[in-house]
């Protein structure tokens, strides 16, 4: 019997098999995946030093008239927000209404400026228009419908679609110019004395801001998605020697709509999707908190996640052998299989459940810090506090798991595949790193909360690049959600 009784959640009853889920052995197949040669190195140019922790919240503008028409906007200033775009900006305003910002930097282009005005609302702090926050300069392409671009420019337009970092037009390399501009913006943003900064700009420039903050090169263009009014959060922490601050991506592309809603990734539609689900909060009073059951908040989080995933036909749920992961996976599976009586589908769904030992990293963490508990890991970048061997062990384990997932997704007989992976935040951080072809040194550069989901699309199939749709999405948790801009440690507005 499925009965979700948390406030604001579904409440339906129907008959489903009342038995423990069966976990199948994870099938091994030949690995087929591409190795992305990354030019990603930390920038030689140091970031400005900061005296105190700084949080920067990036927001892309709402839907514009040229978004709606399918025109190439670039840095042109002829499109304005649609009614939908105004509504999206209003949703962002409500999401950020209770948060305090010291300053707002915004692109001066109309669509971004209007979005910033709606979000900023009655705040009295300064709004600073910054020309370098304008969208990517696309020169002769600007204003063309996409089919016009193909007809008029042929191979050159195809290069823009397939190999944007090396795309040249009118004597310019737009993506390379954009990355340089994004890096320059950080000098102005970080030099401002404010500790909480809102930046309202555009799709491509926000991608460049995220990537350059983390030291990622132009090959990451169109890999870190920025949807209309999507919110991304970066935390900057000062270091003792007044050098470049430590940087952590706390959230990527939290959108006004569900992140699993049918959509394309970077303009390409794919049939393979990987959803990383962090299990819910674990009962701290349990003798071994790393393998204890979820507390009440954790149970609510798992139910809310299962409810969100009803919009997607999940084909398999793979989890760590730890109790909290198994319980979260079981909740997702039962709700999926009750989709008919919950009114989410007209045909029964069958979900294959599996355990994968490579997802179990809690023992590695606990051996390093025996007195640690799950609640210890709330600070962004907490993995930087572990010795190298712990990071190496987690990283190596995640690599094995990642290859297994790619093998599973490579089965063309399955057609559309939506795979849910449930585990500890540490292993999901490592899996995101594997997807981006990073090194273990980047593990401290991401943060995930209990109950969050992160989504990876494969628009070119599992043999191509994975595209990160979102990281650390928590809006589905409702009143139990982790605030977008406030610290998850002390709940202080920053």
Image (cartoon, rainbow, N blue to C red):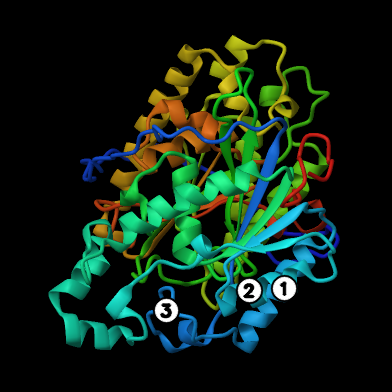
Q: Which residue is mark 1?
A: 117
Q: Residues within 10 Å of mark 2 (few under 14, many from 20)?
A: many
Name the spot of residue 435 as percent of width and height, x first: 38, 43
The answer to whether residue 275 is seen in the rendering is: no
Q: Position of residue 157 (x, y in %)?
A: 21, 74
Residue lying at 54% horizontally and 82% vertically, measured from the top left? 64
Q: CA distance from mark 3 to mark 1?
A: 21 Å
Q: Which residue is mark 3?
A: 73
Q: Along the horizontal axis of the image, is 488 left or right of 153? A: right
* Badge 2 element: helix
Residue at point 72%, 73% (across, down): 117
Q: Residue at x 27, y 56 (%)?
A: 165
Q: Nearer the viewer, residue 215 or 243?
A: 243
Task: Give the CA distance from mark 2 to mark 3.
Answer: 15 Å
| Quadrant (top left, top right, bottom left, bottom right) of the N terminus | bottom right
- Between 255 and 117, the one lying in front of the other is 117
Give the mark nearest the N terminus, 3 or 1: 3
Residue 382, how many percent across, how many down?
63, 27
Q: What residue do we see at 63% from left, 42% from top?
A: 191
Q: Earlier in the sequence, mark 2 or mark 3?
A: 3
Specify the quadrant of the image occupied by residue 154: bottom left
Is residue 23 toward the left or the right of residue 100 in the image? Answer: left
Q: Would residue 69 appear left or right of 80 to someone viewing this image? A: left
* Circle 2 residue: 113
Tell whether label 3 touches label 2 (CB within 8 Å): no
Report if the CB atoms under discs 3 and 1 are less than 8 Å apart. no
**Numbered label attached to residue 99:** none
The number of discs equals 3
The local crowd at label 1, few if under 14, some if 14 to 19, many if 20 or more residues have their Cα within 10 Å, is some
Q: CA distance from mark 2 to mark 1?
A: 6 Å
């Amino acid at each position: 019997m499925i009965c979700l009784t948390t406030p604001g959640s579904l409440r339906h009853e129907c008959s489903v098999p009342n038995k423990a889920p069966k976990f199948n052995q994870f099938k091994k197949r030949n690995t087929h995946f591409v190795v992305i040669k990354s030019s990603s190195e930390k920038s030689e140019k140091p970031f400005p030093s900061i005296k105190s922790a700084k949080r920067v919240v990036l927001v892309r503008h709402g839907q514009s008239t040229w978004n709606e028409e399918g025109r190439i906007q670039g840095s042109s200033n002829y499109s304005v927000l649609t009614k939908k775009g105004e509504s999206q900006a209003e949703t962002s305003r409500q999401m950020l209404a209770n948060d305090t910002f010291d300053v707002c930097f915004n692109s001066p282009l109309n669509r971004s400026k209007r979005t910033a005005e709606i979000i900023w609302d009655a705040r009295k702090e300064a709004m600073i228009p910054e020309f370098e926050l304008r969208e990517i300069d696309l020169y002769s392409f600007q204003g063309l419908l996409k089919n016009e671009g193909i007809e008029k420019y042929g191979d050159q337009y195809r290069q823009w679609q397939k190999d944007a970092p090396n795309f040249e037009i009118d004597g310019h390399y737009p993506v390379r110019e954009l990355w340089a501009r994004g890096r320059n913006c950080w000098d102005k943003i970080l030099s401002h004395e404010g500790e909480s900064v809102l930046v309202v700009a555009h799709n491509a420039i926000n991608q460049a801001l995220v990537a350059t903050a983390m030291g990622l090169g132009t090959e990451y263009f169109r890999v870190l998605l920025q949807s209309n009014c999507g919110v991304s959060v970066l935390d900057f922490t000062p270091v003792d020697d007044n050098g470049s601050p430590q940087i952590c991506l706390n959230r990527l592309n939290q959108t006004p709509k569900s992140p699993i809603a049918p959509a394309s990734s970077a303009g390409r539609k794919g049939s393979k999707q990987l959803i990383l689900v962090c299990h819910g909060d674990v009962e701290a009073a349990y003798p071994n908190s790393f393998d204890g059951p979820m507390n009440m908040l954790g149970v609510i989080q798992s139910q809310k996640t299962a409810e969100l995933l009803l919009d997607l036909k999940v084909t398999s749920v793979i989890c760590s052998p730890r109790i909290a992961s198994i319980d979260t996976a079981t909740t997702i599976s039962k709700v999926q299989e009750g989709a008919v009586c919950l009114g989410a589908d007209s045909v029964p769904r069958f979900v294959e459940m599996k355990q994968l030992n490579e997802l179990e990293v809690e023992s590695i963490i606990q051996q390093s810090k025996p007195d640690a508990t799950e609640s210890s890991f709330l600070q962004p970048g907490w993995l930087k506090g572990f010795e190298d061997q712990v990071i190496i062990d987690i990283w190596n384990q995640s690599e094995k798991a990642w290859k297994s997932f790619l093998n599973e997704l490579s089965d063309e007989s399955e057609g559309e595949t939506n795979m849910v992976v449930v585990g500890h935040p540490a292993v999901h951080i490592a899996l995101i790193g594997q997807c981006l072809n990073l090194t273990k040194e980047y593990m401290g550069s991401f943060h995930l909360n209990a109950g969050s989901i992160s989504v990876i699309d494969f628009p070119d199939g599992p043999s191509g690049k994975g595209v990160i749709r979102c990281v650390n999405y928590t809006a589905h948790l409702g009143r139990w959600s982790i605030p977008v801009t406030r610290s998850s440690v002390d709940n202080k507005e920053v």
